[in-house]
Amino acid sequence: MDGQSPKTSSSKCEECKKWRVIHSEEEYEEIRSKISTEPFYCNKKSGVTCDDAADIEYSASRTWVIDKPDLPKTPEGFKRHLVARKDYSKLDTYYITPNGKRLRSKNEMAAFLRQNRMDEGISASDFDFAPPKVMEDTVPEIFSKKGSDSVRKKLKMRKNEDKSTDITAEEDFE
């Protein structure tokens, strides 16, 4: 599975291998949480079949990430949040609590649940901080040679020319 833009995700049909946009975060998490036992097929989307054109094509025109299969669904009231590193090397996973606090590890989550008396029915093991895998063949060329001086110079020049960075990937980026 992969995402195509902030807050929009997609899944690959097991049969025809076409990418289908999943418009709801809840639906995406449901598919992702069961992907090994219940593969995604085009006909799971209303009015869509394998004969239809793909919703989106895998290409280097955007940066793609592949989420770990069978991640548990995010508990109600919390939000899974992914932040891309500046060099596109990986994403960092955070969870936003119902009161807006950003947590970055299972230990922080366990402490939060205890402090807020939310540890009945929810445990830190219900949260997976494993980041999705960045598909290297879709990372902008400027970042493909990590650490070299020429890349840093190109990056600095690019930042001076254009302050904005357009990232396309799974879930929600900052």
Image: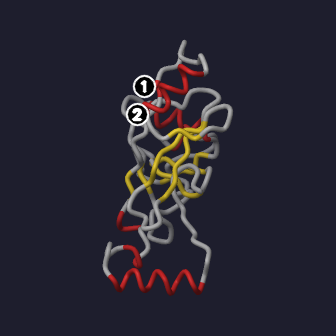
What residue lies at 39% left-to-right and 42% top-to-bottom?
Answer: 130
Under circle 2, the secondary element is loop
Three-letter amino acid code at the position of disc 1: Ser
What is the CA distance from the residue labelled 2 to the residue labelled 1?
13 Å
Q: Which residue is mark 1?
A: 125
Q: What kind of residue is marked 2? A: Asp
* 88 to 75, vertically: above or below: below
Q: Is residue 143 left or right of residue 57?
A: left
Nearer to the camera, 79 or 136 = 79
Which quadrant of the structure image shows residue 43?
top right
Q: Residue at x 48, y 41 (%)?
A: 104
Closer mark to the observer between disc 2 and disc 1:
1
Q: Secondary structure at mark 1?
A: helix
The image position of residue 74, as x and y in percent, is 54, 31
Local crowd size for mark 1, using a 10 Å CA cut-off: few (<14), some (14–19), many (≥20): few
Task: Sort mark 2 into few (<14), some (14-19) or many (20+) by Cα contacts within 10 Å.
Answer: some
Q: Earlier in the sequence, mark 2 or mark 1?
A: 2
Pick whichever, 133 or 9, lies toward us.
133
Residue closest to the eye, 108 or 5: 108
Instruction: Provide residue 124's location: percent of width, then percent of height.
Output: 46, 25
Q: Quadrant of the C terminus?
A: bottom right
Q: How many marks?
A: 2
Residue located 38% across and 60% down the image: 135
The circle drawn on residue 70 is: 2
The furthest residue to the right: 99
Residue 8 lies, in percent from the top left, at: 60, 51
> In this rendering, is residue 143 above or below 154?
above
* Colour scheme employed for the rendering of this structure: secondary structure
Mark seen at residue 103: none
Q: Is residue 67 left or right of residue 27?
A: left
